[in-house]
């Protein structure tokens, strides 16, 4: 082991700047923990003439990746530049050159994580990615270390700050979806293209990473059922509240006998559920383990310093492993074959909002259909619509299988007495 750890940093944007700042400001603590100084030797950027709000010697910043990948003096590569194929190539090359890698790149890991972890193991290198899920919350380490003795059966996460911010502001302040999305962009939570936030793709990538680690299997982005929040209306949020629920974009990963389901969708939670009180851009992950029971991890899910804390903590682990001579052993081989549940194995409650004809017989037609599918009502609300001969009916069902619910939903939309099915959401929590 060298008497200084030399880092090559790919990217000096929001997260990269935070990484440099923490390494500079917390040098004493880092040295105390790992026994030697940590030095940022080279930083890759797209444009080295761009003004930066961090002080770095001019010769450290480069636009040439070879100054890092082919540099024998670099021990650890920190990738915080984002991107897919080219970035994957850089990480693979770094590992093949026996450099340890720390990354915050959820997009890449959700698709190529298993392949990159294999390359890391083959080359005796560490590959850590704590910052890829829920920013500053040490959730991956909690799963792989703190809860390693347990068998995790359920994880529910608010893992996207932008959508949580939007839903909070819409429901608490009555703001419009478009206005709050703009605010989230201005505040820097949203991705460059916010489609991946609002359509649930960012959360789905994070849930694929969480489920892989929590269930010791290989879940990829394509295995996650995804629905975003772009169609959620203020009326939906209002009725949720009236019935005692809060709507959140929930990433759910659940397993029963090693058959798993992973989804991201707008979900109603009872207002007393711990995840219902996670507001604004904050993230939280609820984890249920067979032995430990319920646990919850809460904190900032994005931003420069919170995310950089997770990145630098991974760097500390790499450095400790280097000192102990145990790098490359941290890569866990999945224990279980991935088996996804079929629609008839996924059970959930549902919220339904219908516009129905306000006349005698409507209700009995609807209840007969529910009876035919053996779906019972848990809660029911009917409100006349002013000036129209229709009523709004809001139903919370008891649990039924996805397959059964889908068939019921199709038949409901075809009923003469139902003018339209305005919305339908999954309901979690409670009995
Ligand atoms: P960012 O602010 O856009 O910064 C990206 C940096 O990488 C910039 O310095 C850019 O150089 C450099 N870069 C990008 N492409 C490059 C290329 N092809 N060659 C050389 N340099 C390149 O991004 P960020 O928000 O820091 O995010 C970085 C990564 O962390 C992403 O994978 C993101 O998903 C992940 N992440 C971010 C957050 C967050 O809160 N921001 C949280 C968790 C994870 P220039 O400065 O010269 O343009
Ligand atoms: N756009 C992401 C979010 C950034 O809103 O959570 C952190 O991954």
Image (cartoon, grey):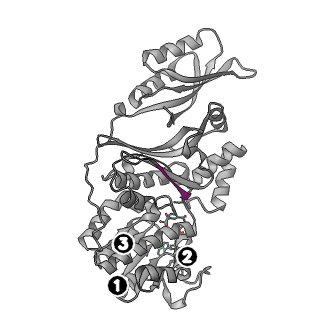
Q: What residue would you read off at disc 1?
A: 70
Task: Mark 1 or mark 3: name the one nearer the start of the chain.
Answer: 1
User: Does the closest atom of ligand 1 sit within 8 Å of the Cβ of label 3?
Assistant: no
Q: Tell me the quarter of the picture where residue 100 sits.
A: bottom left
Q: Nearer the viewer, mark 2 or mark 3?
A: 2
Asked if residue 298 lies in the magenta stretch, the reply is yes
x, y (%) of residue 165? 62, 52
Task: Mark 1 or mark 2: name the one nearer the start of the chain.
Answer: 2
x, y (%) of residue 87? 40, 70
- Judging depth in this view, the residue of 429 and 267 nearest the camera is 429
Is residue 175 in view from this perspective? no
Is residue 212 in view from this perspective? yes
x, y (%) of residue 408? 45, 23
Do the numbered discs 2 and 3 sit on residues whose CB atoms are within 8 Å? Answer: no
Residue lying furthest top: 360
Report the residue at 35% width, 53% height from top: 212
Asked if residue 340 lies in the magenta stretch, the reply is no
- Secondary structure of residue under mark 1: loop
In this view, 413 is above or below 310: above
Distance from Cα at disc 1 to Cα at disc 2: 23 Å
* Neighbourhood count class around disc 3 (C-alpha, 10 Å): few under 14, some 14–19, many 20 upward: many
Task: Mark 2 or mark 3: name the one nearer the start of the chain.
Answer: 2
Q: What residue would you read off at disc 2?
A: 17
- Judging depth in this view, the residue of 171 and 97 nearest the camera is 171
Distance from Cα at disc 1 to Cα at disc 3: 12 Å
Most common SS among magenta residues? strand
* Neighbourhood count class around disc 1 (C-alpha, 10 Å): few under 14, some 14–19, many 20 upward: few
Provide the residue span drawn in magenta.
Answer: 295-299
């Amino acid at each position: 082991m060298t008497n200084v750890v030399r880092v090559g940093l790919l990217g000096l944007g929001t997260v990269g700047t935070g990484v440099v700042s923490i390494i500079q400001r917390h040098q004493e603590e880092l040295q105390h923990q790992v026994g030697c100084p940590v030095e940022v030797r080279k930083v890759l950027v797209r444009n080295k003439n761009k003004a930066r709000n961090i002080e770095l010697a001019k010769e450290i910043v480069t636009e040439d990746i070879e100054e890092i990948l082919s540099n024998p003096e670099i021990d650890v590569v920190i990738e915080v530049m984002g991107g897919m194929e080219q970035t994957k190539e850089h990480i693979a090359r770094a590992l093949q050159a026996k450099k340890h890698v720390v990354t915050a790149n959820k997009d890449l890991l959700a698709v190529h994580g298993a392949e990159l972890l294999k390359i890391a193991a083959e080359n005796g290198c560490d590959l850590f990615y704590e910052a890829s899920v829920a920013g500053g919350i040490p959730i991956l380490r909690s799963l792989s270390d703190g809860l390693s003795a347990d068998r995790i059966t359920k994880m529910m996460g608010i893992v996207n700050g932008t959508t949580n911010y939007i839903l909070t502001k819409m429901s608490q302040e009555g703001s419009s979806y478009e206005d709050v999305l703009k605010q989230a962009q201005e505040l820097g939570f949203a991705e460059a293209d916010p489609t991946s936030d609002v359509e649930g793709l960012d959360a789905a990538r994070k849930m694929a990473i969480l489920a892989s680690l929590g269930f010791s299997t290989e879940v990829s982005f394509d295995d996650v059922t995804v629905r975003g929040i772009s169609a959620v209306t203020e009326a939906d949020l209002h009725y949720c509240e009236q019935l005692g629920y809060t709507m959140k974009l929930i990433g759910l990963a659940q397993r029963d006998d090693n058959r798993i389901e992973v989804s991201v969708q707008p979900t109603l939670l009872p207002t007393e559920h711990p995840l219902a009180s996670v507001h604004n851009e904050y993230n939280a992950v609820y984890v249920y383990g067979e032995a430990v029971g319920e646990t919850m991890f809460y904190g900032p899910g994005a931003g420069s310093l919170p995310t950089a804390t997770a990145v630098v903590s991974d760097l500390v682990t790499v450095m400790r492993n280097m000192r102990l001579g145990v790098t490359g052993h941290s890569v866990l081989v999945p224990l279980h074959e991935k088996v996804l549940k079929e629609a008839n194995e996924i059970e959930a409650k549902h919220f339904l909002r219908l516009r129905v004809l306000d006349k005698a017989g409507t209700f009995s037609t609807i209840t007969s259909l529910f009876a035919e599918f053996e779906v019972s009502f848990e809660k029911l609300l009917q409100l006349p619509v002013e000036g129209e001969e229709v009523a709004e009916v809001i139903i919370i069902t008891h649990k039924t299988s996805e397959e059964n619910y889908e068939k019921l939903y199709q038949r409901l939309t075809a009923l003469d007495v139902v003018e339209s099915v305005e919305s339908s959401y999954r309901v979690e929590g409670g009995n």
